[in-house]
Amino acid sequence: MRGAMAGMAGALAALFAVPEALAQPASSSAMVENPCALPRNAGNDWAALCKYQAADKQVSGRPRAVFIGDSITEWWLPNSPALFAGGVVNRGIAGQTSPQMLVRFTQDVVRLRPRVVHIMAGTNDLLGNTGPTSAEEYVNTITAMTDIARANGIAVVIGSVLPTSGAPWKPEYRPAAQIDALNRWLRDFARASGFGFADYYAAMVGEGGAMKPGLATDGVHPSAAGYAVMEPIARAALAEAEKRAGR
């Protein structure tokens, strides 16, 4: 019996050991201990993993929530600092699309072990920031993030795509109708999956699918007044998600 146990322990140790090829000195390959300490650019850090890598390691305890998203999420912090207090962590990155968020979801969300994740993505997918995409690809990335969250015991809040009739830097795109369609899918998906849904769109949409006057700085990004509309919706959605999860 002892021999069998020793053999099993040896097998497990071998299974979880770092492969010798990965334990070679840094000069042997591009796989190194701390790639963010070396020069990286958009070409070799497509998902911007380096942006929050150090900050993630400084998070202590279990956060109440992590907000992952694009510039609308990133710039929410300076506009509503009280929202991002008491264990609510902001992990927005300007310009990102949903597949980039998916790549960093494990690092910037799962490893922090939050009770709730707030996912808001879509504007930059529609504007083609990482190239042409499709509704199916968008659905797949949102679904993948929520699957990962659920598998790790993290409650989910899905934020609607904010209204816009067009971006000054992409005048060829007029995404209002597609935003409405994506939001209907997000709402139905959240309800069917038992997730929270923060419907910023309904509170902020105006004529022609644009944001209501005064709520945006450039037709896409919320102004201080826009974030003031969003904050109570976010707070209510987080509280509801925690209640559903029994936390």
Image: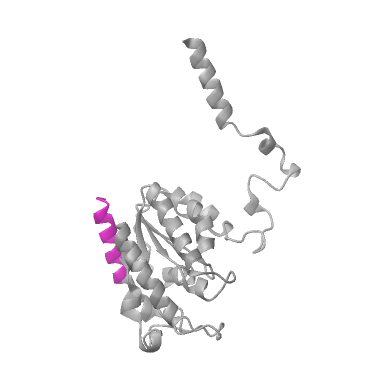
Asked whether the viewer can see residue 245, the reply is yes
Q: Is residue 20 above or below residue 142?
A: above
Q: Residue at x 35, y 61 (%)?
A: 157
State the image quarter where residue 196 is shown: bottom left
Q: Residue at x 42, y 70 (%)?
A: 76
Q: Residue at x 30, y 70 (%)?
A: 233
Given residues 25 and 158, the one toward you in this image is 158
- Hey, which residue is sitting farthest right in the picture? 27
Q: Position of residue 178 (x, y in %)?
A: 44, 77
Q: Position of residue 99 (x, y in %)?
A: 53, 62
Given residues 95 and 166, the one toward you in this image is 166
Number of marks present in the image shown = 0
Given residues 217 and 59, the one toward you in this image is 217
Answer whether residue 22 is magenta in the image.
no
Q: Position of residue 61 (x, y in %)?
A: 39, 47
State the image quarter where residue 33 is shown: top right
**Which region shows up in magenta?**
232-247
Colour scheme of this structure image?
A: one colour
> Mainly helix, strand or loop, the magenta region?
helix
Asked whether the viewer can see residue 61, the reply is no
Q: Position of residue 212 (x, y in %)?
A: 36, 86
Q: Is residue 83 left or right of residue 9?
A: left
Answer whether residue 244 is magenta in the image.
yes
